[in-house]
Amino acid sequence: MAAGEHSGMVERRGASLWLTHAGLILGVLVIVFPIWLAFVASTVTQAEIVRPPMPLLPGDQFLENYRKALVSGINAPVATMLLNSAVMALGIAFGKIAISLLSAFAIVYFRFPGRRVFFWLIFLTLMLPVEVRIVPTYEVVARFGMLNSHAGLILPLIASATATFLFRQFFMTVPDELVEAARVDGARPMRFFLDILLPMSRTNIAALFVILFIYGWNQYLWPLLITTDPQMNTIVMGIKQMFPSGDDWADWPVIMATSILAMLPPVLVVIFMQKLFIRGLVESEK
Amino acid sequence: MATLSLTGVRKSFGATEVIHGVDIDVAEGELIVIVGPSGCGKSTLLRMVAGLETATAGEIAINGARVNEREPMDRNIAMVFQNYALYPHMSVFDNMAYGLKIARRPKAEIAERVTEAARLLQLEPYLKRKPRELSGGQRQRVAMGRAIVRQPDVFLFDEPLSNLDAKLRVQMRLEIKALQRKLGVTSLYVTHDQVEAMTLADRMIVMNEGHAEQIGAPLDVYERPATVFAAQFIGSPSMNILPGEGSGDAVVLANGARVPVAQRVEGKVLLGVRPEHLVPDPEGAIALETGTSEPIGALTLVHGRLEGSTLDCVASLPGVHRESGLPAIQRFSVPPGLAHVFDAGNGRRLAG
């Protein structure tokens, strides 16, 4: 009797286990299928793509298509666009982290006139996405002569209210005694910031880096506006630029190869930072 | 080794004054305990000496030099915090070495001083660990080590033992005392625990609502409390305070009992009697309607009311007394020299 109940329970748990897995596998298939199609399309010839039915297994043009994309591309070599995107995404991620760390440090640890006002001003900009202020921003960037430059791609997007707010919340949880201990130990404010606050924030920094890198990488509208020179195109907007205007035919294998290439860096960042991120979480306060 | 002196030190937060003028001269190597209930301003006083709060008025001097305007790091003090305030991402070694690193001492000297402190505190096996891998007592030691390595003029302790369990607290109390004796560093120690104050202090400051009620050696405070507050705060269980009327060489209590005292008293007074000074005596003047009793082992606390009144009174009897074994009315006498008399108006001790 007891044994029967026991095995019954195991069976039931087994069934639900299979069911969960089946559900998850189905979900993964739904998400992966388009990406698989894109990958397949990037390994066959143009002729194979346009002839129905669409191929579902990779062809033999992998090296040829990717070489063509990376070296010559359509308007600009994809390698150049990848580099532009990397510069922009890294610039935005590092810039945003540096600026928001410092401004959160100022807001939390220094008493200066208008501290609350500044905090609320920063907080207010949370509600203004790039698109809302894009015309005046364009005007400013144009007058600084930063069109078609990396600086022009990065600077307007470099301040982040969200990150400032996040670091502010984190700094406020740091016990006051730690600041006081550092003061007694002789640490001046920047020393305290570099030696104590920064190492304590590394988990937050890692998490933010992932988010901000992807945010920078996926910027579409802003690069589209300010880069007219194909040599300055970023990859996300570059893909769109590859579509022909008028009656020209689209070079689908190269476009698909570019798409796959555009996806890789964010995926790598997530995979690589995830390790850091989890280690940070495990290591932090019990 | 240094002297520390506070002269008329006051502190206000806005319009509210929280420290109403404290004066004390601390001799070299002396351990001063600031004791009082929470909110009495004892931590604020310590933080002013540390330089973490500014003094509104008065002077703080270390070795005779005014330090009011100096940053904490320039006062050559070290502080041990209640929650230890260890840097969570640094190893024990780095925690202790941080102050010296900032002071740009040579690496060899830092290593030597940290190792020496670690040896003194038996922390040598843990130097590579992070604070979270240590027990409460060990963290407490690291916090002390961080203070020691700096070889400061003055140690400041802000309730360093209140996060430890009772047993460890007793052990660390002894260690702190031994260490302070050994190093001979002038120290200020804040606590709300009167036992810590009694056992550690060379002299203590009893604080109440921002006033230093009494400054003196622990036994002086115990034997000759200057005010009703000091009398009740120091000693456990706290002193019984019975209102009465002075009549020459005795105090007449509300219920008519005449308690002889060793001084001449007139007018409205408060009679203070420590529970341990109530001696069972069939002829005694003080009669208690006994209530609950709390046997602690070595002694029994008998709670009761003064006969014919609603005044609570506690007597501490040596040995074990069961509640059922106590008479409904127990009489006590007080050796005249052990009764304290305070002015009923301002609560100050009346000189004998």
Image (cartoon, rainbow, N blue to C red):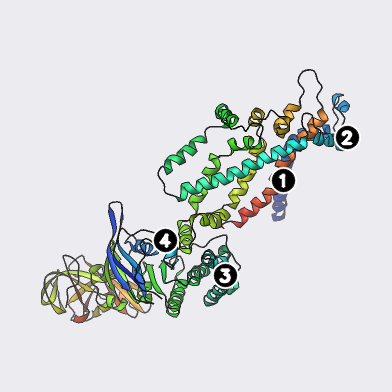
Residue under label 1, please give it.
A17
Determine whether, in the image, residue B74 is placed left or right of residue B56: right
Q: Are marks 3 and 4 in contact (CB under 8 Å)?
A: no
Residue under label 3, please give it.
B106
Looking at the rendered structure, the kind of residue marked 3 is: Pro
Write down the chain letter for disc 2.
A
Write down the chain letter for disc 3.
B
Looking at the rendered structure, the kind of residue marked 2 is: Gln
Residue under label 2, please give it.
A61
Q: CA distance from mark 3 to mark 4?
A: 23 Å
Residue B247 picture location, percent across and down = 10, 74
| Mark 4: secondary structure | loop
Q: CA distance from mark 2 to mark 1?
A: 41 Å
Residue B219 picture location, percent across and down = 30, 78
Q: How many numbered markers are drawn?
A: 4
Residue under label 4, please give it.
B71
